[in-house]
Image: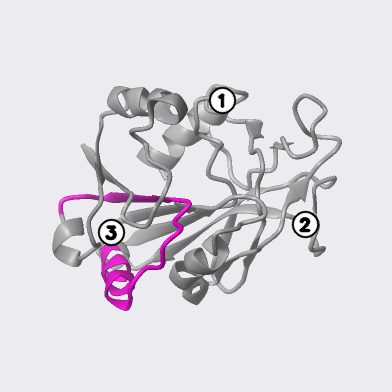
Amino acid sequence: MNKLLWDVNHREFSISDHYYFSKLQNYFNQWGIEWDERDEKLTSKFLSPFNILVLCYPEEPFSPQERKAIKKFLENGGKVIIAAYYRCSDNVTEICNTLTEEWGIKFRDDEVTDPQHCLENDPLLITTTKIPFPIEGVSRIFFPCSASLKIEGEAEALILGEESAKSDMGGGQVVLGAMKKVGKGKLIALGTCVFWDNFAIEKLDNLEFCKFLFTSL
C-alpha cells in the first residue's frame, strides 16, 4: 500500500479542506492510498513511514535540514510531488526552486494561456494532449492557471502545452510538468496545484492522470 504524506508545515493548501479536496480524498481511498496530513518539520525519521510526499503550493521556506531530508527520501525511493500556480506570489516560485533547481527543474514566475485549447473560452483554463509518453485512459487533460517550467540536463517533460500555449515570459514550447529520477525515487514538478481539486479532477482525463501520478509513475 502507498503511504502518502500531505505536508502543511509550510502553509500548503490543506487536503483536509473538504470544499476543495474531498473528491481527491475519496479517490485516495479507492486507489488504496493511506494518506496523512501533518504539520511537522520534515526529517528523515518522520518521512520514513511514507513513500509519497506532496507539497501543494508551499508558502514557507524549507530549512537546509528539511531539504537534506527530502533529498534522502528521494534517493531511498520516495516520490515527491511539488505543485505551484500561475503568477506564483507568496515567494512560492523561489521556495519550490530551492528543492528542484539542483535537479534541472526550475519553476517560472509566469502564467500560461492558450486561447485555442481551453475550457469555457477562458485562455487560463488550458487543456493539452501533449503528454510525451502514453498513459492508459489519458488523451487530454485540464491544467488550469498554470505556470511553466524550465528543464535542463536529465530532467524530462511530463506535460507540455499545445503549440498555441504561450508563457507571458516568452520562450519556446511550454513545459507544464516535469520529472527527474533522483536515486531510487522520482521528483515530479507541476505548474499548477488546482488540476486535482474538486472543480478540476473529474474534467477530461484528469482523474486517470492523477491515478497514474500517485499509483503508477
Contact, CB < 8 Å: mark 3 with mark 2? no
* x and y percentages locating residue 197 in the rendered image: 50, 31
Residue 136 visible (yes or no): no
Q: Is residue 128 above or below residue 11?
A: above
Image quarter of the N terminus: top left
* Quarter in which the C terminus is drawn: top left
Q: Tell me residue 211's x, y (percent).
A: 43, 32
Q: Does the magenta stretch include residue 115?
A: no
- Residue underneath mark 3: 77
Look at label 3 and name its amino acid: Gly
Question: Start and end of the magenta stretch?
Answer: 49-73
**Point 21% across, 50% down: residue:** 50
The residue that appears at 50% across and 25% down in the rendered structure is: 198
Residue 78 percent location from the top left of the image = 29, 56
Q: Mark 2 points at which residue?
A: 173
Categorize mark 3 by other alpha carbons within 10 Å: few (<14), some (14-19), many (20+): some
Query: 19 or 154: nearer the eye?
Result: 19
The disc label shown at residue 199, or none = 1
Q: Which of marks 3 and 1 is nearer the N terminus?
A: 3
| Residue that appears at 37% across and 36% down | 15
